[in-house]
Image (cartoon, helix red, strand yellow):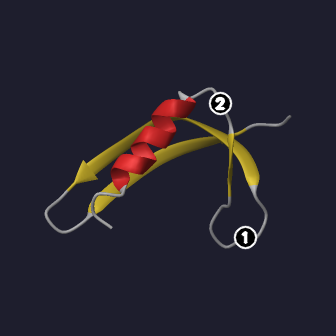
Amino acid sequence: RKGEHQNLEAFLSRHGGVKSFLWTPPYTWTQIRVICRKWSISVGSLWVTVTTTFEQVVI
């Protein structure tokens, strides 16, 4: 929903591209640990588009 992108952007900013988090890829049940160094958010009149680049990390 519109407005929720602010929470997502705050989350990604807090992690700063270096702190990993769990993410569930589409069409799977298995979570993986990722970092996100790069993202963009485009706010339109009807929807918000969020584009991210996740890198899987191995611990």
The foreground one among 55 and 16 is 16
How far, Cα to Cα, is label 2 from label 1?
Answer: 23 Å
Place of residue 53 in the rendered image (x, y in percent of width and height, measured from the top left):
52, 43
Amino acid beneath label 2: Lys
| 39 up-or-down from 14: above or below | below
| 12 up-or-down from 32: above or below | above
Which of the 4 quarters of the picture holds residue 58? top right
Mark 2 burial class by Cα count in 10 Å: few <14, some 14-19, many 20+: some
Give me the residue at 18% from left, 69% from top.
46
Give me the residue at 44% from left, 49% from top.
8
The foreground one among 11 and 59 is 11
Quarter of the image containing the N terminus? bottom left
Mark 1 burial class by Cα count in 10 Å: few <14, some 14-19, many 20+: few
Kindly state the secondary structure of the residue where label 2 is placed: loop
Furthest residue in direction bottom, as rendered: 27
Place of residue 43 in the rendered image (x, y in percent of width and height, measured from the top left):
22, 53
Image label count: 2
Amino acid beneath label 1: Thr
Give me the residue at 18% from left, 59% from top.
44
Tell me the tag on residue 28. Answer: 1
Mark 2 or mark 1: which comes first in sequence?
2
Q: Which residue is mark 2?
A: 19
Residue 2 placement, left or right of 18: left
Furthest residue in direction left, as rendered: 45
Give me the residue at 65% from left, 30% from top.
19
Place of residue 25 in the rendered image (x, y in percent of width and height, measured from the top left):
65, 61
| 55 up-or-down from 26: above or below | above
